[in-house]
Image (tube, helix red, strand yellow):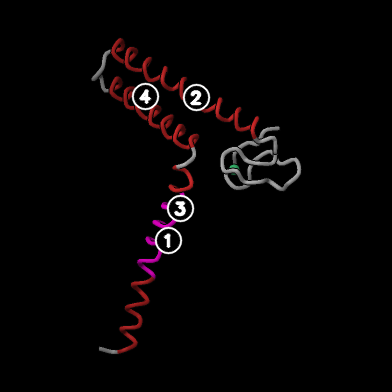
Amino acid sequence: MDITLLFYYVLLLVIIVFPFAYVQQRLKKGFESHSYQETGHLETKRLMLLDNLRDLRTEMDMQKLTLSEFQDLSSEIVGNLQEVDKEISEQKLSFQKTNPNKNECMECHYIVKIEGAKFCPMCGTQLSV
Ligand SMILES: [Zn+2]
């Protein structure tokens, strides 16, 4: 076998594998930084509840559920959703109380150095004014 062919073969393999390895690394990092944040956990719960609600709605549209069944099931989910929303806003409030530094983002804890910035440059969360 030609040695240059072997070289190009290895190079091609690296080019193909690299994006996957990179993305996996990024996902791992993102997961680690979020798994210890309670708000992140609550946001996930919230998204799951919204997903469930959407599923129920789809099932009703496909006439697998009657309107009263839908209302029963969805009222439970909406109740949970309100609880989660309350917990999230409570956590944000307590974060603001314990962190008087208004330049710190409450989502990613990035210190915003731009004077009068309204949004976090790292994650886009609206900053408290
Ligand atoms: Zn941020």
Please provide percent x and percent y for residue 73.
32, 16
Q: Nearer the viewer, mark 4 or mark 2?
A: 2
Quarter containing the N terminus:
bottom left
- Between 34 and 15, the one nearer to me in the picture: 34
Q: Which mark is residue 6?
A: none
Confirm or reject: label 1 Cβ below 8 Å from ligand 1.
Answer: no
Q: Quadrant of ligand 1?
A: top right
Kindly identify the amino acid type of the residue bearing the numbered disc 2: Asp
Q: Are marks 4 and 1 in contact (CB under 8 Å)?
A: no
Q: Is residue 9 magenta?
A: no
Q: Are marks 3 and 2 in contact (CB under 8 Å)?
A: no
Residue that carries the numbered disc 3 in the rendered image: 29
Please provide percent x and percent y for residue 119.
65, 40
Residue that carries the numbered disc 2 in the rendered image: 85
Distance of mark 4 from mark 2, alpha carbons? Answer: 15 Å
* Circle nearer the N terminus (4, 1): 1
- Between 89 and 19, the one nearer to me in the picture: 89
- Above or below, 93 relative to 33: above
Distance of mark 1 from mark 3, alpha carbons? Answer: 11 Å
Distance of mark 4 from mark 1, alpha carbons? Answer: 34 Å
Confirm or reject: label 3 Cβ below 8 Å from ligand 1.
Answer: no
